[in-house]
Image: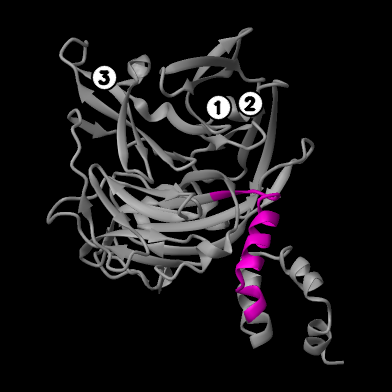
Amino acid sequence: MDRGKTMESLPADLIREIFTRLPSKSVARFRTLSKHWASMLRSPEFSKLFLSRSSTRPRLLFAVERYRCNEWQFFSTPQSQNRYEKSAHLDYHTKFSGDVSQYICSYASGLIYFPAVRIVDTNTILICNPITGMYVGLPEIMKDRRSRGFLVFDPIDKQFKALDHQFILTLGSGELKWRSNEIPCPLYERCSSTQGICINGVLYYLAKTLVAETHFGLTFLIVRVDVRSEEFKFIDAARFNDRLEDPTRLSLVNCMGKLGVTNCKCVKAGGRRTVELSMSVLEDVEKLEWVKYVYTLPENEVLGSSKFSVAGVTGTGDIVLCMKYTCKPYYVFYFNPEKNTLQSVEIQGFGAKLEEVENRGEVFAYVDYVEDLSVNDAKQLKSSISHVKSRCSCCQKLAA
């Protein structure tokens, strides 16, 4: 029996339905088998249908940095949709070697932006697709100036932009070139230890600015950038100034379409150690109205004794916390504020190397990742990230 002819004799709607249930990598392989399938699986109609199906099965995306080895690895796993689920297995996607600057990566709609990656002997701003391994390097903004920027996405024009202070670069607009958007603004510096968040075409990130009246001479502000209009606004964030000396516990999250700022600390409750999580939600951007929620999480021995970070808030309202470093066992925690439940899910599949204490990696996790074929097919990403090489931090030899 000729299986290829049998498949092609099936109704087109049924074939499309079958392929929407496959991972994007499998779809990419099937595109190469025949012109008929390539035409069908590259059509805008199929890409739209695939995204619709993918949105019903969101995933957790993990970017793992092995700092001493200048190596990044990317994994993903289905996001828990079952309260009784105890474990989940990772899918490995790709990796690359490159010494990354102190300004951590940022994520937007399936792509990751590294402000400065040391490739061989040159600092490069790099945007990559962690699933396909395709990437593009961006030009320097100014000579001898390291980028501190973000990747953002405009959902209306379906356009990615790189943004670094007042400098903006639009992907897919022909020549990759930075342009300056001169704006009146206070003198501020981005907080390098916190990631920005892009919500419905608006970027938010945490910064510090000088204010003489404060005890430290500094205060927090949140920079708000409309991706489409490229309009900047500055939000007073002095309410978080108790974290000025150590803002690492602050995380910016998408809370059901609104900006949320979370802060975690360990507390004693009933004589036992547990976690207190506070989340301030910007309910009204124009009136700058914040609402603060404080939760004492159900007791969990692992969470109470490990370093962790807030990965984000899922579309169903769960607050996701992840252990900060790879280990065995490694856990992700789903906290449901309405039901006051805490679900622990053991994540398996980082591999024996990453699970060793001496080889552990720092974990950056992103919630509600969905596979999007239009992002995977982006023509501006032209090279394979597996070809990226850097020098070993110990011996300065080129790493594979």
Q: Looking at the image, is 220 positioned above or below residue 20?
A: above
Marks 1 and 2 sit apart, C-alpha to C-alpha, by 6 Å
**CB within 8 Å, label 1 to label 2:** yes
Quarter of the image that includes the N terminus? bottom right
Colouring rule applied to residues: one colour
Secondary structure mostly seen in magenta is helix
Q: Secondary structure at mark 3?
A: strand
- Residue drawn at (74%, 63%), measured in percent from left and top? 21
Highlighted range, magenta: 39-61
Q: Secondary structure at mark 2?
A: helix
Left or right, residue 353 beside residue 181: right
- Residue drawn at (21%, 15%), measured in percent from left and top? 216
Amino acid type of the residue that numbered disc 2 sits on in the rendered structure: Glu
Q: Which mark is residue 305?
A: 1
Q: Looking at the picture, how far across and down is residue 66, in whole percent?
A: 41, 53
Left or right, residue 390 beside residue 305: left
Q: Which sits earlier in the primary sequence, circle 2 or circle 3?
A: 3
Task: Give the class, few, some or many, for how many residues have Cα within 10 Å of label 1's Cα (few <14, many ≥20).
Answer: few
Amino acid type of the residue that numbered disc 1 sits on in the rendered structure: Ser
Task: Give the class, few, some or many, for how many residues have Cα within 10 Å of label 2's Cα (few <14, many ≥20).
Answer: few
Task: Give the class, few, some or many, for how many residues have Cα within 10 Å of label 3's Cα (few <14, many ≥20).
Answer: many
